[in-house]
Each structure stands twice: as structure tokens, then as C-alpha cells.
């Protein structure tokens, strides 16, 4: 396989992890809103760690292979910040928020952070809405 093809394959793997992470998060958010005990199920507790580890590993490998690094490329810095926000807001939404209302608000905020990261990725602009 040529280097370009493996880069592309890795990029699609990265995007597949992105979709799995987003769908998994939205699904868990739905279970949280419904107050379902299935949120504590084994697959839903450990699956996201596997997906997110693969997501981050593919991200760092893509950055390394393409020579575009966070803190050198503003759009990659924006992705890192967006990812930290997605994780932080997401744990409040699924776990730490004390009332259901708080968790619901943080669920929306986490999904907005996710949308922000995807639009940064697609436009390669730290502020895609301008
Ligand atoms: C710190 C974490 C991340 C880094 C360093 C990173 C880095 C990268 C790099 C280098 C590419 C390839 C760009 C190219 O060659 O065209 C890429 C593509 C992409 N990333 Fe990430 N990524 C990160 C996290 C994320 C997250 C959390 C999401 C979504 C929630 C995401 C969504 C995407 C998408 C949708 C693409 C494909 C863009 C396209 O088709 O042009 N990334 N990422």
C-alpha cells in the first residue's frame, strides 16, 4: 500500500472512530435522560474508552504523518481544546451533574462541542462560522 493510501485509510479509520464516539455518546445521553439502568451496562461503560483511545491514537498518528501539529496549526489546537471540552462537558452530562436538568443542559453543550470539532475538522478553521 502506498503512503498516500495508508494515510487515507487511517483518516477514514479516524472518521469512523469519530462517528462511533458521537453516536455512542448520543445513545448514552438518551439512556441518561430516560434514567435507564442500561447506562451502567458493561459494553456502554468500557466501549467508549476503547473507541476514544483509538480516536486519539489515530488523531496523533495523522498529525505525525502529515507533519501538522497542535500548537503549530491553529485548527489542530482548536480540535484539542474542543476535545477537552467534549470530554469535560460529557462527563458532567453522563455522570457528575447532580440533577437531571443539569445533566440535560451539559448533554446539549457536549453535543455542541462535538459539532464544533467536526466543523473545525472539515473547514480546517479554528472558527468555522466566520
Ligand atoms: C486532538 C485530537 C485530534 C487531532 C490531533 C486530530 C487530527 C486530525 C488530522 C491530522 C486529520 C487529517 C486532516 C487531513 O489530512 O485532511 C483529521 C481529520 C478529521 N478529524 Fe480529527 N483529530 C482529532 C480529534 C478529532 C475529533 C475529536 C473529531 C470529531 C469529534 C475529529 C474529526 C475529524 C474529521 C471529521 C476528519 C476528516 C476531515 C476531512 O475529511 O477532511 N477529529 N483529524
Image (spheres, rainbow, N blue to C red):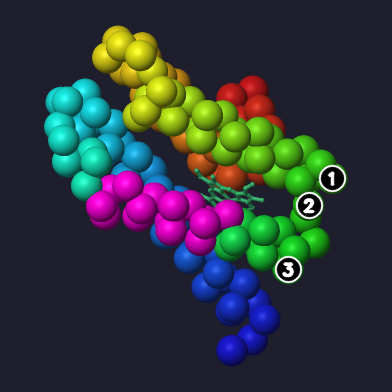
> Does residue 48 sit above or below 127 in this rendering?
below
Magenta-drawn segment: 42-56
Foreground residue, 6 or 95? 95
Is residue 125 visible in the rendered structure shown here? no
Q: Is disc 1 in contact with disc 2, using a CB cutoff of under 8 Å?
A: yes
Q: Name the residue under label 2.
A: 69
Which numbered circle lies on residue 17? none
Q: Does the residue labelled 3 lie within 8 Å of ligand 1?
A: yes
Quadrant in which residue 27 is drawn: top left
Indicate the quadrant containing the C terminus: top left, top right, bottom left or bottom right: top right
Q: Is residue 37 left or right of residue 44?
A: left
Which numbered circle lies on residue 72? 1
Counting other residues with Cα less than 10 Å from the Cα at mark 1, is it few (<14), some (14-19), or many (20 or more)?
few
Foreground residue, 8 or 78? 78
Quadrant in which residue 105 is drawn: top left
Q: Is disc 3 in contact with disc 1, using a CB cutoff of under 8 Å?
A: no
Q: Is residue 105 left or right of residue 83?
A: left
Q: Does the residue labelled 2 lie within 8 Å of ligand 1?
A: no
Which numbered circle lies on residue 65? 3
Residue drawn at point x = 16 percent, y = 35 percent: 37
Amino acid at each position: 500500500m502506498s503512503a498516500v493510501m495508508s494515510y487515507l485509510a487511517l483518516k477514514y479509520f479516524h472518521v469512523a472512530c469519530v462517528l462511533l464516539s458521537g453516536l455512542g455518546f448520543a445513545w448514552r445521553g438518551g439512556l441518561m435522560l430516560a434514567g435507564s439502568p442500561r447506562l451502567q451496562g458493561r459494553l456502554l461503560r468500557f466501549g467508549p474508552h476503547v473507541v476514544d483511545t483509538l480516536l486519539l491514537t489515530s488523531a496523533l498518528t495523522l498529525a505525525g504523518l502529515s507533519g501538522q501539529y497542535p500548537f503549530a496549526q491553529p485548527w489542530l489546537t482548536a480540535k484539542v481544546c474542543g476535545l477537552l471540552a467534549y470530554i469535560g462537558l460529557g462527563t458532567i452530562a453522563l455522570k457528575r451533574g447532580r440533577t437531571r436538568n443539569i445533566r440535560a443542559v451539559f448533554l446539549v453543550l457536549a453535543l455542541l462541542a462535538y459539532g464544533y470539532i467536526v466543523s473545525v475538522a472539515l473547514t480546517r478553521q479554528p472558527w468555522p462560522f466566520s
